[in-house]
Every structure is written in structure tokens, then in C-alpha cells.
Image (cartoon, grey):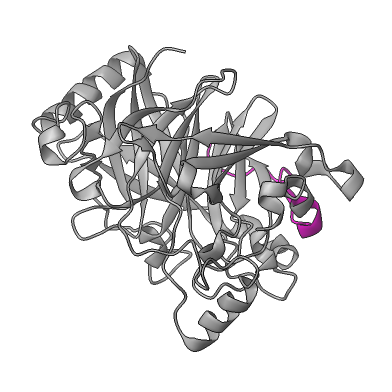
Amino acid sequence: MKLPADRWRKNALRFAMLIPGLLVTGSLAKEPGHLARVPTTLAEPKRKLFRDYDSDAKAARNLSGAACFEDGRCLVVADEMVAVQELELQIDGPTPSYRAGTHFGDLFKTICADFSKGKKCDEVDLEGIDLQGGSVLITGSMGNRRGSGKKDKARWFLAQFDIDPSGKPVEGSLLIQSRRKLLRSAFEQHAQIDDYLEKPLQCDGMNIEGLARLGDDIYFGLRSPALREEGVAMLVRSPMSLLDAKKKSEVPDTELIRLVFRDEDGPLKNTGIRALEPLGERLLIATGDTRVSAARGKKSKKRVAEACSSLLKDGETPNTSNDPDRPRIWIWDPRSDAPPAEIARLAGAYGDQKLEGIAVIGEAGGRVDLLLVIDDPGKDAAALALLSQISVPAP
């Protein structure tokens, strides 16, 4: 949702007034003052997200991505589900909030068996969403289950569908690529990824968390693998024709892009990509810690150890940690050789949260206004929040 310029300026000013010192928040966190930002929490409505699809409404706290239309509606996806949820931002009142709308779980029922290769499909781990006009693109994580380390064919998919002006999916528009071997071949072209396909995240197994389109190209943002000691995270760029491939010879050549993320102390170690969002011909990139908690339970520990046997470091899984996350936002131009430029660090109650999605909801005067998606937020944070007046350098 790119708000009209005068409405955006009005709301941006009001957001700044909601939290004193929003534009100078260095005192709220040990971060450079010009980068630290405290998001504005969006109040949760009585009708929770995914309530019709998930009776316990657990998904409402496990969101993993967002994209917005120009009219105030947004789409969000949740971890470990087969549904897309519409919501409407309500940011004109005294308390910014949102209204839960239609969910599109039914859209996938008829092809659910294709996802899971079984009789039912309870989850495909939706991790990224991109919206261009009325065309929606979503991706699975294409990685193993996080807790158990199990392989999961259902997470290997890429899908596109259209939404009409009323917000309903266009019948017959669903295009899905769920052939695991074909999707694998888009990534195994690259030696730095090939060894980590279908490996547990605890030993740097491939896991997609970011998705964006620029022109006719799809960008997949990888949480893992990463060159963790060097502050290098990776993207894979693929032509859209990947969606149409029917056999391996039709899988297009893809490009591996290595990006170095640096702050005032040098390379930012253990950095993975957590979300992507187009901004003109550039990409906004959300990053966080690439590491995860160690496997729990005897069976899971044994499974992860066996799957990671060739990738262990000193007998230990190398990509594990219980350290808090460090959510940051960057701008990067694929047409330039310059590295990503940091534009914001979440602070306050959001300074250690898992930032899983970003969507532009306003742009004017070299500043952007963002909808943030937080996975499993802490006590004083929320699943959805606003970040206002973030300065973005000119291309």
C-alpha cells in the first residue's frame, strides 16, 4: 500500500508524535542514534488473523511475511500453514490497528495433495510473499523442519495467483511449481548452496525467508547457508520461467549473489536474510541472526546429528545459538556494485525480536513508512507494527 503523498505525510507526522523522540531514539538502545527506531505497535483486533482457518489463532503470532496493495489492504502469510490472510490497516484513528479480512486457505485445498504428496497438507511453511499489481507470489522455505531437522517435500514450492479488485482470487489463475527436483536444480547450480540442500538449519541447511520480484526476476533471500564469519548472506536470482518448468532442462540458469553486511564494528557475523521488499528498482532487506536453537529430544538430536555428520564443526552443529535476534533493515541496488546500506535498527521492545517481513506502506521525500511482521513476538511487542519516516539514500 503506497498511500497518497499528503495522507502519508499526515500519518507519518502522527506516528512520530505517538512516540516522543521517535526520530532520535539512540537513548532507548545502545545503537547509533540515526539508525535506532522504535516501532509503533498495531493493536490486535478482536477478530484475530487466521481465526477461520486456525481455530486456536496460534498463526496470528507466527506471521512470516507481508505485502500491501495501494488501497490500504495487505496480505500476510504465516509459518507452517497453507493460507494467505488479508487485512486492512486502520491507521487514521487514535490507536493504529488493523481489521482481519478474507483468508485464502481454500485456494489451496484442491492442490494440497500436490504440495504434500499425500492425502492432506496441514502445512507448507509459507515464508515469503510478493505483490505486484494484482499478482501474488508466495514461496515455501524449501528447507527442513526447524525443530526436528526432518526433510519435508511439502516445503518445496513456489506459487503465483491473481486477485481481482474486490480481493478475491481469480479462478484459474493459480500457477504452482512443486516439483522438488526442479526447484532443487535452481539452487544446486551453486557449490556454496549445493552441500546444504535438505540439511537441518542447525548445520547451515538452506532455508528461504525472503522473496521479491524485480522486473522478470525472482529474488530468493536465504537465511541460511551464509558465510557467517564474514558477514555474508546470499540471494539467488531466478527468471520467472522457473514457475513454468516441466522438466530439468527447462529450469533456467540462476545467479548466486553474495552480499556483505557491515556495521560500525566491521562485518556483521551470523547474518541471514529474513525478508525482502521491492522499493522501485532496489530491494529493502531485513536481516537477523542466521542461527537457531539446538535440536531437542533424543530422536531429533540423533536425526540432526546424522544429517549434519559431514558438516559438523568440532563435533558440534555450527549454526546454533540462543542469542537474541538483531533485526536490521538495509537498502540494496542490484544494478550497483555497492554493498547494502543500513537504514534502520529496531529498538525498544522490538530490539531483539524476529523480524520476518517488511512491506512499504508509504513513500515520500526520501523516506519510507513500513509495515513490520514479527514472528512469535515477546511480551511487550506485537505481531504487526509500523516503522515510520525511515530515511532512504537516493539511488
Q: Choose between 20 and 160: the one closer to the eye.
A: 20
The residue shown at (77%, 45%) is 189
Tell which of 61 and 38 is nearer to you. Answer: 38
- Give the residue displayed 55% in from the left and 64% down from the top: 203
Image point (46%, 53%), residue name = 290
Provide residue 327's location: percent of width, then percent of height. 34, 44
Q: Quadrant of residue 255?
A: top right
Q: Specify the quadrant that holds the N terminus.
A: top left
> Is residue 50 depicted above or below 163 in this figure?
below
Residue 343 x/y as whole percent: 34, 27
Residue 168 can be seen, yes or no = yes
Most foreground residue, 101 or 183: 183
Q: Where is residue 266 in the image (x, y as percent from the top left)?
A: 36, 35
Residue 175 drawn in magenta: yes
Magenta-drawn stretch contains 165 = yes
**Total marks in image:** 0
Establish if 61 lies above or below 71: below
Specify the farthest residue to the front: 314
> At 67% across and 65% down in the image, what residue appears?
154
Over which residues does the magenta segment extend? 164-183
